[in-house]
Image (cartoon, helix red, strand yellow):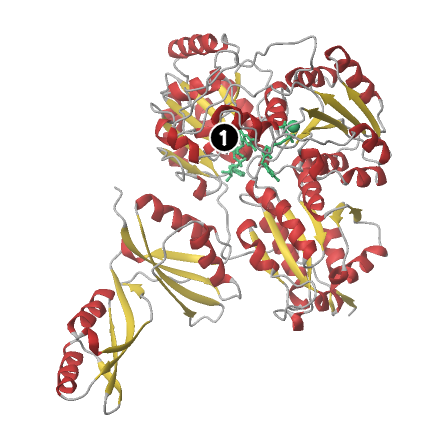
Amino acid sequence: MNNNNRHLISILMENEAGALSRVANLFSARGYNIESLTVAPTDDPSLSRLTLVTSGNEQVIEQIVKQLNKLIDVVKLIDLSETDAIERELMLVKTKASGEQRAEMKRLADIFGGRILDVTDATYTIELTGDGNQLDNFLRAIEKDAILEVVRSGATGIARGQKALHV
Amino acid sequence: MELITGAEIMVRCLKEEGVEYLFGYPGGAVLHIYDALYVQDDVKHILVRHEQAALHAADGYSRACGKPGVALVTSGPGLTNAVTGIANAYMDSVPLVVFSGQVPTALIGNDAFQEVDAIGITRPCVKHNFLVRDIKNLAETIKKAFFIATTGRPGPVLIDLPKDVTIAKAEYHYPKKVKLRSYNPTIKGHAGQIRKAVDMILSAKRPMIYTGGGVILSDGSPELVELTQLLGYPITNTLMGLGAYPATDKQFIGMLGMHGTYEANMAMHECDVLIAIGARFDDRVTGKIEKFCPTARIVHVDIDPSSISKNVQVDIPIVGSVPNVLRAMISVIRDEKLKPDADALGKWWRQIDEWRGIKSLSYRQSNEVIKPQFVIQKLYEVTQGQAIITSDVGQHQMWAAQYYHFDRPRQWINSGGLGTMGFGLPAAMGAKFAFPDQDVACVTGDGSIQMMLQELATMKQYNTPVKIVNLNNGYLGMVRQWQEFFYQKRYCMTYFESLPDFVMLAEAYGHVGKRIEKPGDVEGALREAFAMKDRTVFLDFITDQTENVFPMIPSGGGQNEMLLAERDEMVSTHDEGMVLL
Ligand SMILES: Cc1cc2nc3c(=O)[nH]c(=O)nc-3n(C[C@H](O)[C@H](O)[C@H](O)COP(=O)(O)OP(=O)(O)OC[C@H]3O[C@@H](n4cnc5c(N)ncnc54)[C@H](O)[C@@H]3O)c2cc1C
Ligand SMILES: Cc1ncc(C[n+]2csc(CCOP(=O)(O)OP(=O)(O)O)c2C)c(N)n1
Ligand SMILES: [Mg+2]
């Protein structure tokens, strides 16, 4: 029961100044763990969509969901880990790419479905999307020394099938 | 179309909300608002002497009469002074609407004179807050603030008003109603859950009703009394819930928790079905969670889903408002002519009466020195149990809760969640504004009273006669008690080597003061004080310096591990309890 499971929670909230800090504040004030957080406006400009990854046992996650719902700015939310959902994260990686490394790096990027966005004679900048595990796997696959910079967007997600989060 | 200033809009909105009193303190950022207040007398402004007191007075007013309390403070230090009062109201779920001045919008973020991030500072201790940047949104924001503060689980809402917004002009339009797509509290309980709960409640052999502040906040006392008497079950109240069920009724077995009665805590520990209503399983009540109600199945009625299964997992949660849910339960029981198990209940009551026989609230009376408990007993007699009692925080608070028997809701006003020393006096003033014709007494201590003493001046200015019952033990008694029990009597910083002459002090503020040093003089002094209907009287009772509050469940203990007066010279605590409060 005390298993700390990872949860992907997606929130529709009022697109108002301060709404994001209410969510962030809640996590720090109550000592909940927050692994990543992404936020952007939606097709309805009055709403923004915030997706966060947290972890905790069943009881903690239940409290997190209740406390989030209690925030006046939160309109609706869904725990995507409780349904069949698609999870995606964007990663940009700048790698060394000279000499023999160059071909190998290109090959690995291809295998992982990455795109090379920028090329210099000594570096590649690669774009990858996938779930967290796929991105981790790519980083493990390339040589550690070759990594110059990694930027990850944090996970976002959407339920599969008919289910949709809207007001 | 007439254009009026933001300040005028605010005052008109307050009038439309039926606000009688605005507790506040002026400053640069709110000058325009004060100018708008000057030219009207529908909303009466009460000038306190410290912003914290404005909040506590608004809070006491609200707790006494049920209407939202309203306060106004200036930017910067005005707002920071108010924060304790806001947090206090937040912890006890009191509906307040607080206006704070702010520097002009163009200067926000520039470290302007008397600028603080009011929204950021108050975010963790308000139900919600708003920064109004555009005068067009002002009236609607005020409507939303009152709506949010007073519905669902009540709480304080802050509106931060930049000075330019109070000066700008707009048409006045106050919406009759607001709807928020993101806020819609559940009032009516789920019928299926209520049905299940009734079955569980009636299947009980050793039932226990445990109720809290939610019953008072929702004015659910009539429904609670009806249900409790229909069932014939024993009932206990939290510190915040006292008065929701008449304390003098035989089914009431006293307050529960750290300083609750033996019978209430034992019955909690031994019950097989616990019916929790508008109470939040606070650590002062549960003691060590693992030892809490070990044999009980639990029904929990609360309007706030996050109160349910937060500290203790419950079996049947019901989200809804107390009066609605209890009325539904009563209908099911009456319609189906359901009856509790009379035999089991008889046996259970015999057990409870045995626990009652321990008389856990007895204390050793003295002819030499005034016992604090005795003062409260006499206060109860002299006021015939009818006064509104506010209190500060400490031992005196617990004695007031234990020895004054509250028979009606909103009669007992104290700071439970935050435990704010200084709350009592301004809260008493607020209560007196709500009910000028009722006796109001503030039970306080020599430490607490000094935290908001300046309000004696406000009370003189507005003539709000309150009787101050100071249980003067010369110590920060509650902390001293812990040092006696858990720190081998190392009384570090709990003894006041210097105390003011409270009698002279009361007189300096234009009130009546009296020092009482002998047990034989207690009753007479109280009678005399309450006979002076139009005067604030400061009664300085010099009490036993070594008296302790019993019963007591030491931190980390279970509900059945109470220390009782006399018996326990001791005291040790569980090691892990030492980190707890
Ligand atoms: C020195 C000191 C000692 C203390 N010792 C004790 C002690 O011995 N015993 C004790 O009980 N307390 C004690 N307290 C108080 C304690 O800290 C808590 O404040 C108190 O126990 C909480 O009371 P409550 O559970 O009634 O909750 P409240 O804080 O009153 O909360 C009310 C609950 O009701 C719910 N509610 C609100 N409106 C509604 C509605 N319309 N319908 C349904 N539910 C609603 C809310 O969501 C919330 O869950 C002490 C405090 C101090 C300062
Ligand atoms: C603002 C604030 N500071 C500190 C405390 C911690 N505290 C709790 S009770 C208490 C002692 C109160 O002393 P007094 O008012 O004399 O009451 P007594 O316990 O002696 O009856 C203290 C310091 C508090 N509750 N509030
Ligand atoms: Mg004292």
Is B20 located above or below residue B394 in the figure? below
Q: Position of residue B462 (x, y in %)?
A: 83, 40
Is B324 located above or below residue A68 in the figure? above
Q: Is residue B326 left or right of residue B77?
A: left
Q: Residues within 10 Å of mark 1 (few under 14, many from 20)?
A: many
Residue visible at 33% across and 67% down? A154
Residue visible at 66% across and 9% down? B366
Q: Quadrant of ligand 2?
A: top right
Task: In this rendered view, identify the residue nearer to me: B567 or B83.
Answer: B567
Q: Is residue B65 left or right of residue A142?
A: right
Q: Is residue B192 in view from this perspective?
A: yes
Tell me: is circle 1 under 8 Å from ligand 1: no
Residue B393 falls in image quadrant: top right
Q: Position of residue B436 (x, y in %)?
A: 79, 33
**What amino acid type is highlighted by mark number 1?**
Leu
- Residue on which the image places disc 1: B326
Q: Is residue B195 in view from this perspective?
A: no
Residue visible at 69% across and 13% down? B369
Please give the chain letter of the residue carrying mark 1. B
Residue visible at 50% across and 50% down? B184
Task: In this rendered view, identify the residue nearer to me: B237 or B369.
Answer: B369
How many marks are shown on the rendered structure?
1
Q: Position of residue B345 (x, y in %)?
A: 41, 12
Is A75 located above or below residue A150 in the figure? above
Residue B69 falls in image quadrant: top right
Task: In this rendered view, identify the residue nearer to me: B318 or B569.
Answer: B569
Q: Is residue B203 left or right of residue B15?
A: left
Q: Is residue B54 left or right of residue B309?
A: right
Viewport quadrant of the N terminus of chain B? bottom right
Q: Position of residue B178 (x, y in %)?
A: 60, 56
Element assignment for label 1? helix
